[in-house]
DNA sequence: TACATTATATGCGGTACCGCATAAAAATAG
DNA sequence: CTATTTTTATGCGGTACCGCATATAATGTA
């Protein structure tokens, strides 16, 4: 493929996406403004619109970027160690992300900012559901391989509860929970999830 | 207390609160407009401001109204029946509320609309945390009384996971989960939470 | 009946926001 | 060098929203 025809992009698409992710992570879809993203990146709004579409489309791309990073972390859970070690490692990696950010803890971009939009926007509702299902399936995969649990254990049921613990961590982190409280939940969740 | 001095209220405060709750439940704080609430109730905006303060104050009152209704439902969990029956009954009562609404499922007003505001507004972050803690404590009370579980079981740890299941139900309902999926989660959660 | 008090109704001011339209700029292709 | 294509920059239009200020109405009190 040769060089593109017209005037080249003057901005870095990845940089804009990261700025958008930060803005939406802090304020959600309704609370964030394209003006702020445009100013933060030095890109004019019409350029954003041409490259990414409208505000909602940019938001959904930012969510996808975030989810992709989460899924990369989830692969560390692929069964290298024991079930409880893998679960703990994944929860801790997630919390690491949830508690990052200079301006305080922000939880999960998807779980903490999509639900509020999910009633008015079918598109976002479907995307949110896709995120939830993906988390369920990631845990399901891990539980299916868990030989620590007897054959009578329902891997699917465990996965639903494991997802719930993750969502809870996401919410609590954003609500300002301490690391100590977070750790207690991780321990309680893993302990219960690994019962025979 | 005698009658108040000046001109009497021409609107029903409770009716306004319910309209506010509906609006915020659907759209969240940023997405809902005072204009819409004013129009829906026939009350002019300045009257709302005089009676309830600004938008955020009205939102927090609507959340308090909702949480109060939830807590009333939680008291049904006071230990009348077995642990698993009480947990199931409470989850089902909550889900009943989460899946109500003509325009589709809305989940929990607090869990689904407060987090997005919790980064920018310390007031809402604290209020959200208070809701979470209240849920934790409600479950904690119930687990402390559960004699089905041995004395070695950590009631506090169980409560943290039980809360997580509730939050998960709230999120999934808003994401459009089916009643079947919701039921599976309740069953999986209760089953695990009642393990010895 | 006159006054004080509270609530209501209307309207203004300012801000922020999104989307689009138009014109200029920067690159490639012929 | 000209034409074409794509991006950029500026600006306009319209909408929605919140908060406040002012004037009016309705009630209790003297």
Image (cartoon, coloured by chain):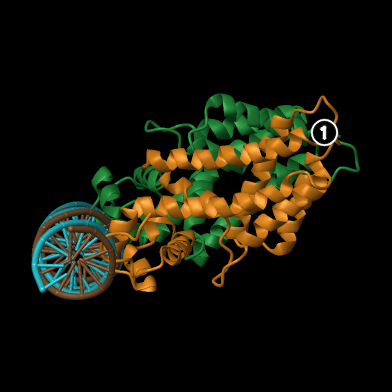
Chain colours: A orange, B green, C brown, D cyan
Q: Position of residue B112 (x, y in %)?
A: 50, 47
Q: Would you say B25 lies left or right of B166 here? A: left
Residue B139 lies in quadrant: top right
The residue depicted at 57 percent of the width and 35 percent of the height is B94
The residue depicted at 75 percent of the width and 57 percent of the height is A183
The residue depicted at 48 percent of the width and 34 percent of the height is B176
The residue depicted at 50 percent of the width and 54 percent of the height is A65
Element under disc 1: loop
Residues B50 and A55: in front is A55
Q: Position of residue A172 (x, y in %)?
A: 62, 55
Quadrant of the snapshot with the N terminus of chain A = bottom left
Residues A114 and A184: in front is A114
Q: Would you say C25 lies left or right of D19 here? A: left
Q: Position of residue B66 (x, y in %)?
A: 49, 44
Quadrant of the snapshot with the C terminus of chain A = top right
Is residue A15 among what the camera can see?
yes
Residues A171 and A142: in front is A142
Query: Dot 1, how many residues are within 10 Å of its Cα: few (below 14), some (14-19), or many (20+)?
Result: some
């Amino acid at each position: 493929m040769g060089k593109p025809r017209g005037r080249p992009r003057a901005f870095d698409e990845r940089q804009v996406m990261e700025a958008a992710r930060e803005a939406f992570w802090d304020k959600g879809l309704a609370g964030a403004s394209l003006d702020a993203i445009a100013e933060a990146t030095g890109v004019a709004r019409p350029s954003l619109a041409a490259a990414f579409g409208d505000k909602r489309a940019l938001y959904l791309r930012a969510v996808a970027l975030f989810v992709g990073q989460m899924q990369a972390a989830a692969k560390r859970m692929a069964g290298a160690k024991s079930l409880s070690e893998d679960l703990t490692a994944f929860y801790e990696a997630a919390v690491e992300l949830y508690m990052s950010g200079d301006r305080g803890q922000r939880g999960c971009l998807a779980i903490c900012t999509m639900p509020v939009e999910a009633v008015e926007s079918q598109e976002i509702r479907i995307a949110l559901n896709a995120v939830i299902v993906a988390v369920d399936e990631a845990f399901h995969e891990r539980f299916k391989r868990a030989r620590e649990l007897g054959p009578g254990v329902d891997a699917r049921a465990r996965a639903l509860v494991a997802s719930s613990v993750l969502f809870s961590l996401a919410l609590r982190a954003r609500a300002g929970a301490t690391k100590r409280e977070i750790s207690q939940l991780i321990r309680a969740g893993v302990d219960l999830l690994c019962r025979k």
